[in-house]
Image (tube, grey):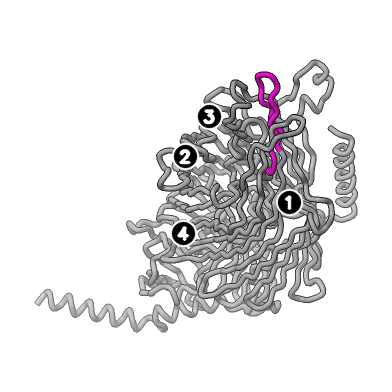
């Protein structure tokens, strides 16, 4: 009898929890993707501050062109030994890296996706993933005062060093303000936070991105210095021709 | 330093200080690289060079200007007699040059056409460092096993972008030869001239050697080279086909004169840069999540005969044979790379033929394997297993093979600073690059600071 009571209570809980969510986890993730990728295109000038375990800081400057959900070009402007290094992401997971020292554009395979990009806490995967709703399954974890917390598990594990993510979506606009990365053992590995949300041209934009490697006590803070939205970027910007073009 | 070098330095300095003052947009950067290489076997210092590379750039919407002067000190004094001590250039072997100096004009005449004019590095091919299809720029072989280093050439390069196709055309009015290594490392690339087994040379030993190079006649039809390439992207792979018409940049002997002088045989060689046509094909992409690339180049050389003479009055021809056959031959590279979870990276290439291996009978098979692992957010990179295996043919593996082992540690203590420490060990038998380097096992330290 006690066993039956427990099952009944659990069913009531699940029914209640489900009815509390106005939208399904899948919809939340989709809406989160939509709000992140809402601008038609963007040009962003960034400053990245990388903090080592011992507190040593170094600065990187980069520019980023983005269009739609599958085209992005990132180019380092400083420091001197990284100036001109550029990374291009195209549809169907096609990625190119330009290393000025080798005078060569190289197509890179997805095995590099879990590697850190140029000594920062951002991986190639972080830089090339635009729509987690298409690449992950989502399930509800908990509801907080202002946020939904969902667990996202990659459908294809290739290029993913993490086992699953916990993403925190704001209830009012579904903006994904925080992502926790859990390693294969289920331990918290990395935290990505989108801070200083601002509304620009009716789009919600995070002006500061902080990525903290909890295991190695290493942090990267990326700040938006300049942003231009809906500037009519042509597809040709996202090309090998433009990858090597110094601006 | 010769007056021309001094003048070049002063001119460059004035140009860019003034241009920097006029244009705040001129960016100035560069690096200082210091290399020391100590030979284990004879404890000699093989290299003690310091190189300052500068880079001045100005960028506008429609054009980009780059000038990159290079000042290099070899670091080993060339002092043979007291008078040499009075010449600073003998004490400090200094060279001043410009590795690149070009202007890019974007959307030149057509919106889809870019053009680059001036001294530039043009690197074609998808393989890692060893590119059989990259023949426009001559190789800088001064580092021997630092594959892939090239010298800038005066050229016009146009790139026409149409949809997924890139049509490239390069024209080089002037011929530029490869740079060869200094000192006894030269012998690793160019084998010693044998003394013929004939009665005239019996009981003589090797005397002095003189090597004369015949440059192409200074007319456009002889010095110019051109190359075309069509690149595209299909089914996730980058493909390109290319054609090069030009010359080998490493010289080939066409005549050797032997002079018997008492108990010595003196040798006078004559070399030239034969013409060659090269049809190339390359691809790059991925398979099963691994990087994959391949390159093949069909070399169609002109025939070169070598004539051997015993000097005297009159000289006697003692032999004549083909040193470079006109029969086409193929050089190729197939490679793959992968990064394991946790950051362990491997890179494997199978190579048939290197830049200095000219002619179908001189090609060797190489297997090049590199493994590396980064630590502390790429502050430290350890390359414990860089291996090169070389054989001429499987039939002759016992008498002609080479093994190279180059473990390395790279340390990046801060941005813009890089230290590279390693050892270079080779062993082998026969006439191949690795076997010839057998007595050059060395320790090396490189420090590079960028600004």
Q: Position of residue B316 (x, y in %)?
A: 70, 35
Between disc 2 and disc 1, whose residue precedes? 1
Respond whether the residues carrying marks 4 and 1 are from the same subunit. no
What is the chain identity of the residue bearing mark 1?
A: B
Residue underneath mark 4: A114
The CA distance from mark 4 to mark 1 is 36 Å
Q: Quadrant of residue A163?
A: bottom left
Q: Is residue B263 rendered magenta in the image?
A: yes
**Of marks 4 and 1, the one in the foreground:** 1
- Is A50 above or below relative to A28? above
The residue range painted magenta reads B253-269
Residue B402 bears which disc, if any?
Answer: 2
Q: Nearer the viewer, mark 2 or mark 1?
A: 2
Dot 2 lies on which element? strand
- State yes or no: discs 2 and 1 in contact (Cβ < 8 Å): no
Residue B39 seen? yes
């Amino acid at each position: 009898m006690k066993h039956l009571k427990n099952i009944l209570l659990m069913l009531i809980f699940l029914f209640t929890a489900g009815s509390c969510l106005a939208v399904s986890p899948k919809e939340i993730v989709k809406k989160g993707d939509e709000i992140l990728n809402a601008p038609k295109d963007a040009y962003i000038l960034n400053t990245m501050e990388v903090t080592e375990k011992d507190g040593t800081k170094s600065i990187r400057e980069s520019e980023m062109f983005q269009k739609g959900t599958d085209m992005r070009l990132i180019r380092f402007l400083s420091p001197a030994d990284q100036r001109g290094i550029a990374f291009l992401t195209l549809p169907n997971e096609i990625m190119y890296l330009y290393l000025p020292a080798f005078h060569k554009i190289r197509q890179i395979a997805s095995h590099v996706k879990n590697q850190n990009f140029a000594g920062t806490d951002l991986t190639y995967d972080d830089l090339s993933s635009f729509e987690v709703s298409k690449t992950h399954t989502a399930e509800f974890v908990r509801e907080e005062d202002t946020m939904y917390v969902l667990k996202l598990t990659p459908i294809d594990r290739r290029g993913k060093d993490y086992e699953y993510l916990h993403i925190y979506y704001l209830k009012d606009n579904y903006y994904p303000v925080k992502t926790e990365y859990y390693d294969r053992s289920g331990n918290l590995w990395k935290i990505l936070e989108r801070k200083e949300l601002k509304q620009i041209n009716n789009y919600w934009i995070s002006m500061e991105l902080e990525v903290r490697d909890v295991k190695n006590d290493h942090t990267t803070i990326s700040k938006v210095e300049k942003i231009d939205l809906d500037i009519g970027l042509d597809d040709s910007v996202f090309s090998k021709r433009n990858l090597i073009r110094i601006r | 330093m010769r007056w021309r070098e001094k003048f070049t330095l002063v001119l460059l300095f004035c140009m860019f200080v003034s241009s920097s003052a006029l244009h705040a947009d001129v960016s100035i950067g560069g690096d200082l690289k210091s290399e020391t290489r100590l030979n284990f076997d004879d404890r000699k210092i093989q290299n003690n060079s310091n190189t300052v590379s500068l880079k001045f750039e100005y960028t506008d919407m429609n054009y980009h200007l780059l000038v990159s002067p290079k000042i290099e000190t070899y670091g080993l004094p060339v002092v043979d007699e007291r008078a040499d001590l009075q010449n600073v250039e003998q004490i400090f072997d200094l060279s001043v040059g410009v590795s690149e100096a070009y202007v890019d004009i974007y959307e030149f005449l057509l919106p889809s056409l870019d053009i680059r004019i001036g001294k530039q590095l043009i690197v074609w091919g998808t393989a890692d460092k060893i590119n059989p299809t990259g023949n426009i720029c001559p190789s800088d072989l001064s580092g021997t096993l630092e594959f892939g280093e090239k010298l800038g050439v005066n050229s016009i390069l146009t790139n026409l972008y149409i949809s997924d196709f890139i049509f490239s055309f390069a024209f080089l009015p002037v011929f530029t030869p490869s740079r060869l290594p200094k000192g006894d490392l030269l012998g690793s690339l160019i084998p010693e001239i044998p003394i013929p087994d004939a009665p005239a040379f019996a009981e003589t030993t090797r005397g002095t050697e003189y090597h004369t190079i015949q440059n192409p006649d200074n007319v456009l039809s002889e010095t110019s080279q051109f190359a075309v390439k069509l690149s595209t992207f299909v089914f996730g792979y980058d493909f390109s086909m290319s054609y090069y018409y030009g010359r080998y940049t490493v010289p080939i002997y066409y005549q050797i004169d032997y002079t018997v002088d008492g108990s010595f045989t003196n040798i006078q060689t004559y070399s030239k840069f034969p013409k060659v046509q090269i049809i190339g094909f390359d691809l790059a992409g991925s398979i099963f999540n691994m990087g994959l690339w391949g390159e093949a180049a069909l070399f169609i050389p002109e025939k070169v005969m070598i004539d051997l003479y015993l000097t005297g009055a009159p000289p006697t021809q003692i032999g004549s044979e083909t040193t470079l056959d006109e029969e086409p031959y193929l050089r190729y590279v197939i490679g793959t790379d992968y990064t394991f979870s946790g950051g362990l990276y491997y890179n494997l290439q199978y190579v048939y033929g290197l830049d200095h291996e000219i002619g179908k009978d001189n090609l060797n098979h190489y297997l090049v394997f590199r493994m590396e692992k980064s630590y502390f957010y790429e502050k430290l990179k350890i390359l414990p297993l860089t291996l090169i295996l070389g054989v001429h043919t499987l039939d002759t593996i016992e008498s002609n093979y080479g093994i190279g082992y180059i473990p390395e540690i790279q340390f990046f203590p801060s941005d813009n600073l890089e230290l590279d420490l390693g050892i270079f060990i080779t062993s082998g038998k026969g006439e191949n690059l690795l076997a010839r380097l057998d007595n050059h096992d060395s320790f090396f330290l490189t420090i590079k600071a960028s600004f």
